[in-house]
Image (cartoon, grey):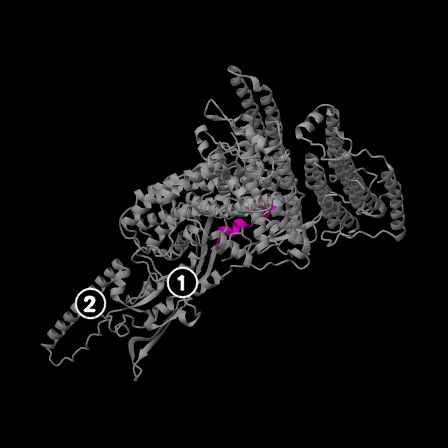
């Protein structure tokens, strides 16, 4: 196999596992960004330029920002040095890993046994014009649906994340969970 | 071990890392990152099959494009939920998000 | 049209950019060490003591150590000690005349209040020294400069001062001559009248 | 440099860089050729743009000085020519202070990644007829993928220096970058729509030729093209934190923004990244709108193509400096409102305008005038409406005098 | 982007936080009412690049908006008034240059008027006209400098400031060739001026005045119409007329809020009643109005200078009978004030017949105008607070004395 593929694969696996193990949320987010860059490299290696670059723009440009903003907004105190996370109990770790290995045990032999039709030689060439024609042609409906999904999710995310102002504060939710009063005047 | 098998193996490894993270970790954000990783592993499969498969058909690539777009939307909504959760419960540990009320 | 103000602003800066190459009004920098600034005649910096003759500046100082400038100087940066001969009689000359230029704010009040035009404002502004205290305390010998130097730096003012002094001297001489004539007249009818005291020495020429 | 064969018809000046490259590669064995050519391309790019960065800082200080009626640096070397090297030595010799509880890795990684990301965008820009580092099919997408990642570096800089103000400033810088990423990309889409391709060399080729002998086919000379060019430049100003939008380092607020905890060479790296980003965005603007290396007039083709590209690039950079000398700074809320309420709507309408333009390509004679009129109206009318709503309540005032 | 309609003005949106009393210790400040959210407390200055000299603002921010602002100054206090009691009347004159070190001529004139009132001295005609010429030149200089500094706070990288300083240098050259020093002129005396201006000097003033009109046109072309400046300054730091009058604000800042009070018209000191000029008044009282009122005042000063130069009579420039050195005014008190470029600058002197004043009090316009800083900044962002401070036009020499 080509050296490039092995290098990229190594990068992806190492950074992904480091991201998932790391205790500092910011470090894990940034390491995951490295994984996404590795994956974009893999797509370029496979010859799908357009996908590689769109992966770079969407994930490294956009999603990483959303993740980092989310991490910063959910810190408990203002200047918590390390965004530490309470460690999971041993039982949970063992159960999780067991389930994962069980799934892996299912997938890998299936993959090995499957009669895959291989095509040797250089991969298919993919031009932007070809993608354009496909998107505008048979997949036009899918493009519009994805557009709607994106808009809906954007508005939904905004509504969920925006701080709830006083007036639409439901009366029954004044439980003592130290709920942030938002901008409401403190009844002195 | 043909190149296709190697690609599938790599995506399986990534998928399992994501799954392990989802199952083990207690922070909501890390679970979302795990899910994100699993989605990326799936995309890698599509591209692998497009590259080494019988070929002549590019729907795999198109599917990956849509999958990236939807995954971005999903990440945005997921993290909005996490922020809303944080505002309610003052913490993003998954333990706190087990009641349906609130 | 919304962008109009912004475009006008750009036009002004462009005009200044081009103007700075040909219009002297739009290129006002003087590269100091190489090009000395043209100081106006009235420019004043630290004071100096006016001496009549160049060969013996300390001897022919106009200053009579009357200490008016020492009292009037707002930041009190002048220090004068009268020169007394062995019998203790004042010799109307400053033995010590120090100006602490680190305190002096060159406000020329001393020049204004000096009745003898003995202290004038200098135009030397490159007086930086590496040594903080003593070098900035100017003594009598560093302060004394000749009247001709005064003419060089403040020609009109020096001319006025000289004219006034000459007029005063002439007036003093006439008074002295008139007094002498009057004395002579009074001396003739009453030779026994006591000789009136010689007029007080004319103020330093 | 692309490995295409060298047509012999053009003037030898045009072909000189390629012949030099082939001569150099000739020294190496055949197997190393593709490595050597890419290394050579990288070396030339980094060298050329590094030198241009050095003299861009000098040009900026000299132009700014001349605009403010003063000479600008002229003490180091003849007329200040050695000033950039003096600055470099100063930056290198300055002590590099890293806050004690800063995140050492991220703190060092931020400036390096910023410079790297600003530079890799230059790989797809055609500097001359044959001078393009990589001939990519989706070149424009590659350029903006590299640009999008710079936000990460700024976040790292802000977060790693563990300082309340630099984190706040990093947040503001990110808000600005993200809200100007959208109009930047949207203003490029019309060009891709009309040129029909994402490849930069094809876009430049599409702008070749002259209508009626003197009117070049550049995109900027069409109504939608000029509007897209202005939107692109405004967004580019914001992306590279230049004058009306240089909020992060606004000295009147949080002192040096996310650069507060940097000193020495890392601080110089940030500036280098800013200038590279500015140069890369200007180079992309030249490629997309000003006809890349196309000569403005037919008989001017005698000058090699890369000279024309350099001339246009330097003109745009001079524009950056000119704007920095003239305009004050916008507030953070005005800045984001300008992006979302003015630039994004204008860019979307411009997209429709470009679609109309490309559909009516066939019109000729009187219809051509109608086409121009409609396209012009589609730019001017939204501009007036949007700017009026943007500027409600503001405007010059009339002053009265007290009754004496 | 720039909705400047008063209804939604920023201060309306902020939660009402009572302005702090002076016993305010920043670190121990309890979060204001309606707590919640994390308040960020930053201190702008004393060596912050945008404060005009050594001045510090303790700002408590809720997110972006200023919730509480306490000015802290006194870093440049030189005990000016106690010194005044120790030195003779003439000895204090050079110290008045150091009060508002941008406008030494008007400081001198205010002090001279106070002493003339105290000692009952008369001033010859020519001296009155020379004083008006110098005061109006100082007004030009001060307002040009202000415009330059204000635009520097708005973010222009130095261009308007350099143009302003280029013109200021020309005026300072005039002062230097007349009084001997650019900024520390020490030129006025009790009963007139120290040096009689020469015809050559007067010609130079006439030439400067003729060139100043075109410079102002170019300066306004660069700034007044600029949309970004309008966006940054219109509707920011709005000072209602009632608050201005109650706080004792004077000068262009008061006139920008709509109150047409100008001492040159009210007191009619010097020869101002004989010269006709208008007093520009703004209606909104925001930063843009303060800038525009000063620019219009500069145009009035140009016409005033022309009239004064034309009507300049001959005769002595100093009342010969007036004693400068040993001046001992009879016991009593006097308050002399003039319309300085920054507002009403006044000197209150109490004499007990000796050579030194018993009480020597300065009424500094910058200090009094500064008291409304917090009311102007509430509800604005830090960037606006910096601009509002710039528009009040303070000089720390005068604020701290």
Q: Vertically, is D299 above or below D124?
A: above
Give the left or right position of residue E16, taking residue C47 as reference: right
- Main SS of the magenta segment? helix
| Residue D169 visible, this orientation | yes
Mark 1 or mark 2: whose residue is earlier in sequence: 1
Q: Chain of mark 1?
A: C
| Residue E246 visible, this orientation | no
Q: Residues within 10 Å of mark 1 (few under 14, many from 20)?
A: some
Residue depicted at 21% across the width and 62% down the height: C163
Q: Is residue D18 magenta?
A: no
Give the residue at mark 2.
C169
Q: Position of residue E284 (x, y in %)?
A: 54, 37
Picture quadrant where residue B72 is located: top right
Do the dots labelled 1 and 2 sit on one chain? yes
Q: State the extent of the magenta-drawn residues as a range.
A: E363-383
Give the residue at mark 1.
C105
Q: Position of residue D336 (x, y in %)?
A: 62, 38
């Amino acid at each position: 196999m080509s050296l490039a593929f092995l290098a990229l694969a190594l990068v992806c696996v190492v950074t992904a596992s480091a991201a998932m193990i790391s205790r500092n949320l910011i470090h894990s987010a940034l390491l995951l960004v490295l994984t996404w860059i590795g994956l974009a490299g893999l797509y370029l290696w496979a010859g799908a330029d357009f996908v590689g670059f769109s992966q770079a723009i969407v994930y490294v440009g956009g999603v990483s920002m959303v993740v980092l903003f989310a991490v910063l907004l959910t810190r408990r105190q203002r200047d918590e040095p390390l965004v530490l996370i309470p460690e999971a109990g041993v039982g949970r770790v063992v159960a999780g890993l067991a389930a994962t290995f069980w799934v892996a045990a299912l997938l890998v032999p299936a993959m090995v046994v499957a009669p895959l039709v291989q095509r040797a030689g250089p991969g298919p060439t993919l031009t932007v014009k070809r993608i354009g024609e496909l998107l505008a042609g048979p997949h036009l409906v899918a493009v519009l649906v994805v557009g709607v999904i994106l808009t809906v999710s954007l508005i939904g995310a905004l509504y969920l994340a925006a701080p709830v102002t006083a007036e639409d504060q439901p009366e029954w939710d004044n439980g003592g969970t130290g709920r942030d009063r938002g901008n409401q005047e403190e009844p002195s | 071990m043909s190149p296709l098998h190697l690609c599938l193996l790599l995506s399986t490894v990534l998928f399992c890392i994501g799954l392990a993270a989802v199952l083990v970790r207690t922070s909501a954000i890390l679970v979302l990152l795990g899910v994100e990783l699993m989605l990326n592993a799936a995309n890698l499969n599509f591209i692998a099959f497009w590259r080494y498969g019988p070929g002549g058909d590019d729907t795999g690539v198109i599917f990956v494009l849509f999958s990236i777009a939807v995954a971005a939307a999903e990440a945005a909504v997921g993290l909005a939920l996490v922020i809303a959760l944080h505002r309610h419960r003052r913490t993003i540990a998954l333990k706190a998000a087990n009641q349906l009320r609130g | 049209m919304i962008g109009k103000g912004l475009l006008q602003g750009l036009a002004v800066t462009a005009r200044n950019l081009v103007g700075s190459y040909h219009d002297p009004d739009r290129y006002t920098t003087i590269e100091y060490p190489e090009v000395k600034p043209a100081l106006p005649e009235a420019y004043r910096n630290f004071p100096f003591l006016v001496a009549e003759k160049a060969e013996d500046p300390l001897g022919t100082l106009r200053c009579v150590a009357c200490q008016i400038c020492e009292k009037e100087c707002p930041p009190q940066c002048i220090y004068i000690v009268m020169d007394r001969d062995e019998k203790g009689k004042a010799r109307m000359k400053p033995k010590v005349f120090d100006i602490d230029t680190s305190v002096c704010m060159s406000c020329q009040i001393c020049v204004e209040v000096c009745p003898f035009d003995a202290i004038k404002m200098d135009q030397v502004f490159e007086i930086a020294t590496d040594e903080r205290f003593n070098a900035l305390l100017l003594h009598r010998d560093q302060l004394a400069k000749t009247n001709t130097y005064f003419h060089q730096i403040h020609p009109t003012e020096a001319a006025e001062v000289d004219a006034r002094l000459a007029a005063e001297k002439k007036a003093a001489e006439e008074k002295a001559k008139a007094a002498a004539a009057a004395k002579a007249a009074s001396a003739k009818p009453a030779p026994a009248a006591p000789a009136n005291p010689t007029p007080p020495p004319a103020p330093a020429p | 440099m692309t490995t295409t064969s060298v047509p012999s018809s053009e003037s030898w000046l045009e072909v000189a860089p390629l012949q030099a490259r082939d001569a150099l590669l000739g020294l190496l064995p055949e197997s190393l050729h593709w490595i050597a050519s890419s290394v050579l391309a990288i070396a030339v790019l980094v060298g050329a743009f590094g030198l241009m960065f050095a003299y861009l800082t000098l040009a900026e200080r000299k132009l700014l000085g001349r605009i403010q009626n003063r000479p600008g640096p002229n003490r180091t070397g003849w007329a200040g020519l050695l000033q950039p090297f003096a600055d470099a030595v100063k930056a290198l010799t300055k002590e590099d202070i890293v806050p004690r509880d800063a995140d050492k890795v991220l703190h060092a990684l931020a400036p390096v990644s910023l410079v790297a990301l600003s530079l890799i965008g230059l790989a797809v820009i055609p500097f001359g007829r044959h001078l393009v580092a990589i001939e990519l099919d989706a070149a424009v997408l590659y350029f903006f993928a590299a640009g999008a990642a710079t936000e990460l570096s700024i976040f790292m800089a802000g977060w790693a220096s563990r300082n309340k103000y630099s984190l706040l400033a990093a947040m503001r810088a990110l808000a600005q970058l993200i809200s100007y990423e959208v109009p930047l990309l949207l203003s490029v889409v019309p060009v891709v729509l009309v040129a029909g391709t994402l490849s930069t060399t094809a876009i430049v080729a599409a702008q070749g030729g002259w209508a009626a002998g003197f009117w070049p086919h550049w995109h900027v000379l069409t109504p939608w093209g000029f509007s897209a060019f202005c939107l692109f430049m405004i967004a580019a100003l914001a992306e590279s934190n230049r004058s009306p939008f240089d909020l992060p380092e606004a000295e009147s607020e949080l002192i040096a923004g996310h650069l507060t905890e940097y000193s020495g060479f890392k601080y110089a790296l940030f500036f280098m990244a800013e200038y590279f980003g500015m140069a890369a965005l200007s180079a992309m603007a030249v490629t997309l709108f000003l006809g890349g290396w196309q000569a403005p007039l037919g008989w001017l083709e005698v000058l090699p193509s890369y000279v024309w590209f350099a001339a246009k690039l330097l003109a745009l950079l001079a524009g950056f400096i000119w704007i920095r000398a003239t305009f004050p700074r916008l507030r953070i809320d005005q800045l984001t409102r300008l992006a979302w309420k003015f630039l994004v709507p204008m860019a979307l309408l411009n997209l429709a305008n470009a679609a109309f333009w490309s559909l009516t390509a066939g019109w000729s004679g009187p219809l051509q005038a109608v086409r121009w009129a409609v396209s012009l109206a589609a730019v001017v009318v939204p501009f007036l409406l949007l700017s009026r709503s943007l500027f409600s309540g503001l405007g010059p005032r009339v002053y009265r005098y007290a009754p004496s | 982007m720039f909705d400047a309609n008063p209804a939604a003005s920023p201060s309306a949106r902020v939660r009402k936080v009572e302005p702090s009393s002076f016993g305010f210790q920043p670190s121990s400040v309890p979060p204001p009412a309606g707590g919640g959210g994390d308040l960020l407390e930053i201190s702008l200055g004393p060596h912050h690049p945008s404060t005009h000299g050594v001045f510090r603002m303790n700002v408590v921010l809720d997110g972006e908006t200023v919730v509480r602002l306490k000015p802290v100054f006194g870093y440049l206090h030189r005990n000016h008034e106690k010194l005044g009691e120790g030195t003779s009347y003439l000895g204090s004159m050079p110290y008045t240059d150091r009060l508002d070190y941008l406008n030494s001529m008007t400081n001198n004139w205010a002090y001279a008027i106070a002493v003339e009132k105290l000692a009952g001295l008369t001033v010859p005609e020519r001296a009155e006209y020379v004083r008006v010429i110098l005061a109006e030149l100082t007004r030009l200089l001060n307002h040009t400098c202000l415009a330059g500094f204000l635009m520097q706070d708005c973010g222009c990288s130095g261009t308007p400031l350099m143009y302003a300083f280029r013109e200021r240098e020309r005026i300072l050259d005039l002062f230097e060739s007349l009084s001997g020093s650019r900024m520390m002129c020490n030129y006025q005396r009790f009963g007139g001026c120290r040096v009689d201006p020469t015809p050559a000097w007067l010609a130079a003033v006439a030439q400067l005045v003729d060139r100043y009109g075109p410079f102002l046109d170019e300066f306004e072309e660069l700034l007044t119409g600029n949309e970004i400046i309008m966006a940054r300054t219109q509707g920011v730091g709005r000072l209602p007329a009632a608050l201005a009058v109650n706080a004792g604000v004077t000068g262009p800042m008061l006139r920008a809020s709509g109150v047409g009070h100008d001492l040159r018209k009210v007191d009619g000191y010097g020869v101002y009643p004989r010269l006709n000029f208008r007093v520009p008044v703004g209606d909104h009282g925001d930063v843009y109005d303060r800038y525009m009122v000063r620019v219009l005042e500069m145009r009035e000063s140009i016409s005033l200078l022309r009239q004064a130069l034309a009507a300049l009579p001959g005769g002595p420039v100093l009342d010969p009978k007036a004693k400068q050195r040993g001046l001992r005014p009879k016991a009593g008190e006097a308050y002399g004030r003039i319309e300085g470029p920054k507002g009403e600058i006044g000197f209150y002197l109490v004499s007990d017949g000796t050579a030194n004043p018993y009480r020597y009090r300065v009424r500094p316009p910058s200090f009094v105008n500064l008291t409304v800083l917090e009311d102007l900044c509430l509800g604005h962002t830090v960037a606006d607070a910096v601009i509002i401070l710039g528009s009040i036009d303070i000089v720390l020499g005068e604020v701290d004395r």
